Image (tube, coloured by chain):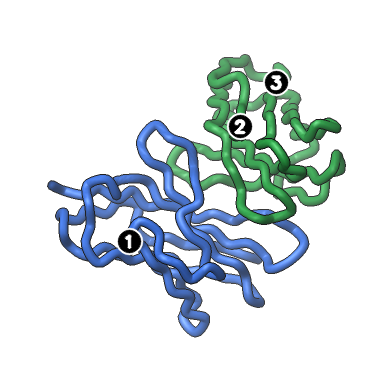
Amino acid sequence: ETGVTQSPTHLIKTRGQQVTLRCSSQSGHNTVSWYQQALGQGPQFIFQYYREEENGRGNFPPRFSGLQFPNYSSELNVNALELDDSALYLCASSLAGYGYTFGSGTRLTVV
Amino acid sequence: AQRVTQPEKLLSVFKGAPVELKCNYSYSGSPELFWYVQYSRQRLQLLLRHISRESIKGFTADLNKGETSFHLKKPFAQEEDSAMYYCALRPPFGNEKLTFGTGTRLTIIP
């Protein structure tokens, strides 16, 4: 059984650029959530996908968007990057709420 | 609005001493509560959830609805307990959003 895999592990982007982060869910999981973890903070919920549809969103602007694919893998897209977007982005998958499995995260640095 | 507060950013405890990591929450209703742990260079992982009422790695957590607290306890600290601990809350049904506290870094002194 594979766990949650995120790519890339590290990324440096320039302010104003766009970025796509990827997540492969744990086998058998149909729900994926994305979290942003700034330095010294706990993870903050961005949004969640269940069976390819967004079914929950946190307090993040529309330039944060996502997709979930038929194989339940997922992407997080961020447009018009700002310096404050620098953070660790975590993906977590679950089977309808029975425990989350987290990935190791993507460390995004915006310069 | 739901909120989780972990008042201690850092906590140092001697090996063999009792450990208590504090967590208070704000939620109008009966949420699900969790403790997550992140060991050095490892991913975030579930330690325990209140509905399971189990002890994991010697840790227990009791939900106190009157005080809206979910403190994590262990009677005798071990060096391998050194890690970052996050308390988290989730509404009881439907939306699976987790609300995390800011975390407590626990260091066990040999």
Looking at the image, which residue is at 72% across and 27% down? A78
Residue ID for mark 2: A2
Residue ID for mark 3: A19
Location of residue A54 by image quarter: top right
Secondary structure at badge 1 equals loop
Q: Name the kind of residue labelled 2 in the image.
A: Thr
Residues at marks 3 and 2, CA–CA distance in whole angstroms: 26 Å
Q: Name the kind of residue labelled 1 in the image.
A: Gly
Q: Do the residues labelled 3 and 1 touch (CB within 8 Å)?
A: no
Residue ID for mark 1: B58
Secondary structure at badge 3 equals strand
Looking at the image, which residue is at 20% across and 56% down? B13
User: Tell me, what hue is chain A?
Assistant: green
Q: Which residue lies furthest to the left in this view?
A: B110
Residues at marks 3 and 1, CA–CA distance in whole angstroms: 42 Å
Q: Name the kind of residue labelled 3 in the image.
A: Val
The answer to whether residue B22 shows anywhere in this view is no
Q: Which numbered disc flags the more N-terminal residue, 3 or 2? A: 2
Subunit that carries the residue with mark 3: A
Residues at marks 2 and 1, CA–CA distance in whole angstroms: 27 Å
The answer to whether residue A25 shows anywhere in this view is yes
Q: Where is residue A74 in the image (x, y as percent from the top left)?
A: 75, 31
Q: Position of residue A7 (x, y in %)?
A: 62, 21
